[in-house]
Image (cartoon, grey):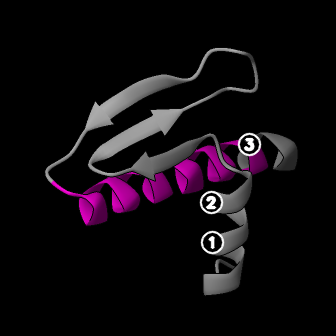
Amino acid sequence: MLTKNKIKQINKDGWYWPEGPVVMCNYGDTHTFTFCMCRNHAEAKAVASGLNVLDWNESNEEEAL
């Protein structure tokens, strides 16, 4: 079950984060890159959070199989 605290932890550990209206990404190597542009910071924060939750969900589905 996803709680607010779990989502906060997922975003803390996730590969995506907002910087102003930009969603940045780093897959754990030395290359950080711009993933996408949004209209404002709130939108970028929502997109980054959604991507982190989707990645977390996908990795947990693979473990359950």
Q: Amino acid at mark 3?
A: Ser
User: Which SS type dominates the magenta stretch?
Assistant: helix
Magenta segment range? Answer: 40-60
Q: Is residue 23 above or below residue 36?
A: below
Q: Amino acid at mark 1?
A: Ile
- Residue 21 is left or right of residue 13, and the answer is left
Q: Residue at x 46, y 36 (%)?
A: 24
Which mark is on residue 44? none
Which mark is on residue 59? 3
Say which quarter of the image contains residue 28: top right
Q: Amino acid at mark 2?
A: Asn
Mark 2 sits on what residue?
Answer: 11
Quarter of the C terminus within the rendering? top right
Front in this rendered view, residue 21 or 13: 21
Disc 3 is placed on an element classified as: helix
* Mark with earlier residue (2, 3): 2
Quote the CA–CA distance across marks 2 and 3: 14 Å
Q: Residue at x 48, y 22 (%)?
A: 33
Q: Residue at x 40, y 26 (%)?
A: 34
Mark 1 sits on what residue?
Answer: 7
